[in-house]
Image (cartoon, grey):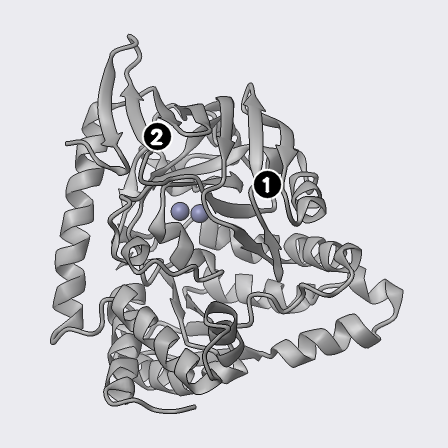
Amino acid sequence: MTVDTGFEQELDALAEVAVRVGLNLQPGQDLVLTAPVEALPLVRRVTAAAYRAGAGLVTPILSDGALALARFRNAREASFDRAPGWLYDGMAQAYEGGAARMAIVGDDPMLLADEDPDKVARAGKANSIAYKPALERIANFDINWTIAAYPGAAWARQMFPDLPEAEAVTKLARAIFEASRVTGGDAVAEWQAHNARLRSRTDWLNDQRFDALHYSGPGLDLQVGLAEDHEWHGGASEAKNGVICNPNIPTEEVFTTPHAQRVEGHVRATKPLAHQGSLIEDIAVRFEAGRIVEATATKGEAVLRKLLDTDEGAARLGEVALVPHSSPISASGLLFYNTLFDENASCHIALGQCYSKCFLDGGSLSADEIAAKGGNSSMIHVDWMIGGPETDIDGVKPDGTRVPVFRKGEWAA
Ligand code: ZN
Ligand code: ZN
């Protein structure tokens, strides 16, 4: 890769922010780190930063796109219903023992686009089932965790198909560093200020105690009931182990739990959804009593249908998130083909599993109590973008009073 001036420095800053702000890794705490092989320059920096912060043991688990393709092109049929449960059980065990978790993303978002959709779906489902014990500890926020990104070459080529690879990588690196707020002098201080701004939004929303959000705009008429005792979160958040961390680098969203049975109306995606190596375009769905009853897409409709059929909760919502249209990621005008970035460009909703964290006193609630309050449960959690420059959102109070929340894609208050 070509190294432009500042690249090394900003990669150092990103590693520092990922460990100190993203994880807020505690002295003596172990770290389970997953990343593509290509991201080694960042993995090495993160490992060094983690040990400087006092890490007990850093365990990196590396993956590679070519290895994944080797399976899809050569493995016997029965392979696609398998997943390394022993590895995920070990990860779950590490979290139970107090380890923190970091995922570095940077793979080719279209890696599996040309593979057999049936095999891709089966492998994805087998993986979701095996991964559930580990994912639950993350979704329940038992421990401090974070996701950060590295500019992989195939990802860069997907985003900038007309540029030579080296230039594309440089452009993607720039976009990642800017979105991750590590280009200024003191990146850690920059993040503290950003977290304070997000906090003022969640405080306001939590004071309002809305019963529902009503979205309107072109092709959009959607009422999303909010779960009983829902709580808004955004930016820095306290995990059940007491550590305040930033689960996503970057992040621009504030989000909470919708009511799985109280979503009505129709909505279209405002950006394509890159899901497990496939692109799903122009998603349009209609909800009745919380469930998607009609779903179409101009591209990748079969992938969308398989996704919605994963389990009972896959066709219901588990997250609703607000992001102003003027967010830096939206302003970049780039489609990243990666949820970590694209969800921060736009208001979004997520199919599937809810975050128990997004309830008042969520840490003490059982799965049954969460379900009784309207929290959804599923093996999947897939975010997709529904916001745009024309989106209006009203907060609806229990007595029917409406309060403007968004006007023309921006915060109304
Ligand atoms: Zn989100
Ligand atoms: Zn989400």
Quadrant for the C terminus, please: top left
**Amino acid type, label 2:** His
Locate residue 253 relative to residue 62 in the image: left or right: left
Locate residue 300 relative to residue 11 in the image: left or right: right
Classify 10 Å Cα crowding around label 1: few (below 14), some (14-19), many (20 and above): many
Locate residue 24 relative to residue 145 in the image: left or right: left
x, y (%) of residue 349? Answer: 45, 39
**Amino acid type, label 1:** Ser
Say the numbered circle drawn on residue 230.
Answer: 2
Quadrant for the N terminus, please: bottom left
x, y (%) of residue 18? Answer: 31, 71
Residue in front for this viewpoint, 238 or 189 = 189
x, y (%) of residue 284? Answer: 56, 35
Between the residue at mark 2 and the residue at mark 1, the CA separation in whole angstroms equals 18 Å
Say the numbered circle drawn on residue 184.
Answer: none
The image quadrant that residue 21 belongs to is bottom left
Which residue is painted at 62% across and 62% down in the image?
277
Q: Secondary structure at mark 1?
A: loop
Q: Secondary structure at mark 2?
A: loop
Which residue is painted at 53% across and 47% down in the image?
382
Residue located beneath label 1 in the image: 378
Looking at marks 2 and 1 on the same chain, the residue that comes earlier in the sequence is marked by 2
Which residue is painted at 88% across and 70% down in the image?
76
Locate residue 268 relative to residue 249 in the image: left or right: right
Classify 10 Å Cα crowding around label 2: few (below 14), some (14-19), many (20 and above): many
The image quadrant that residue 205 belongs to is top left
Asked whether mark 1 and ligand 2 are closer than 8 Å, the reply comes as: no
Residue in front for this viewpoint, 43 or 403 = 403
Residue in front for this viewpoint, 311 or 52 = 311
